[in-house]
Amino acid sequence: MPYPKIFGFLEKLSIDMGGTAGSLGIQDEPTVFTTKDKMIIAPVICYESIYGGYLAKYVRKGAQWIAIITNDGWWGNTPGYRQHFNYARLQAVSLRRSIGRSANTGISGFINQRGDAFQQTPYWHDAVVRQTINKNDKLTFFAQYGDYPGLIASILVLPVIVITFFGKRKNQ
């Protein structure tokens, strides 16, 4: 349901035809999965995978690797599904976590902690792939502290921009 604060009253009018009726739920905090042999996995759905700060929350909760499940069909045959896959490579590097990615129409495959991709499936092809995933429980600076260096750099560059702008205006 878009804009639940505005249109929330309409949820009661939705027709239940089985499956999900109304709005989907959300969590305040991500939840990791723990297997019976104590492996901790971050279960990431679709577009959540592009938000590094969000994935870092999984890692701070102990996630040793990341499983991404996505539907890239809505991209069509555009660069979008390839970019979505490459965002996962970026996350693997910044968090130092291996990733297993399953896309029903896009690119499935595996990404190691250095961002190297293995067994990438072609667009819109059925495939079954298998790979050994290396887990990691060490925290990178980004996983532990977030994007503070980027934030600090953005704040520090502001005076430089202002001084440059006003310096040019003064010289004219």
Image (tube, rainbow, N blue to C red):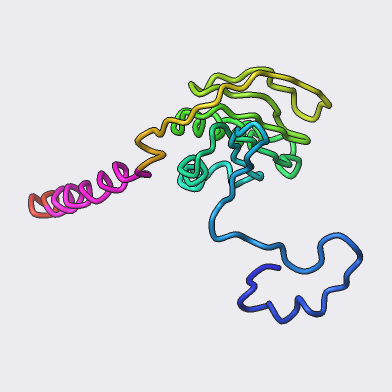
Q: Residue furthest front?
A: 37
- Please state the horizontal and vertical placement of residue 112, each as a whole percent of the image: 55, 22
Left or right of 24? Residue 52 is left
Q: Residue furthest right?
A: 17
Q: Main secondary structure of the magenta part?
A: helix
Q: Residue at x 79, y 79 (%)?
A: 12
Left or right of 74? Residue 169 is left
Left or right of 70? Residue 161 is left
Above or below, 68 against 159 in this view is above
Q: The N terminus appears in which quarter of the rendering?
A: bottom right
Q: Nearer the viewer, residue 33 or 150?
A: 33
The region drawn magenta spans 145-166
Left or right of 134? Residue 165 is left
Q: Residue at x 54, y 42 (%)?
A: 50
Q: Residue at x 59, y 24 (%)?
A: 111
- Please state the horizontal and vertical placement of residue 133, each as a whole percent of the image: 61, 22
Above or below, 53 against 90 in this view is below
- Please state the horizontal and vertical placement of residue 33, each as a whole percent of the image: 63, 42
**Label tally:** 0
Above or below, 105 against 160 in this view is above
- Please state the horizontal and vertical placement of residue 43, each as a whole percent of the image: 64, 42
Q: Nearer the viewer, residue 93 or 107?
A: 93
Q: Nearer the viewer, residue 97 or 168?
A: 97
Residue 7 lies in the magenta stretch: no
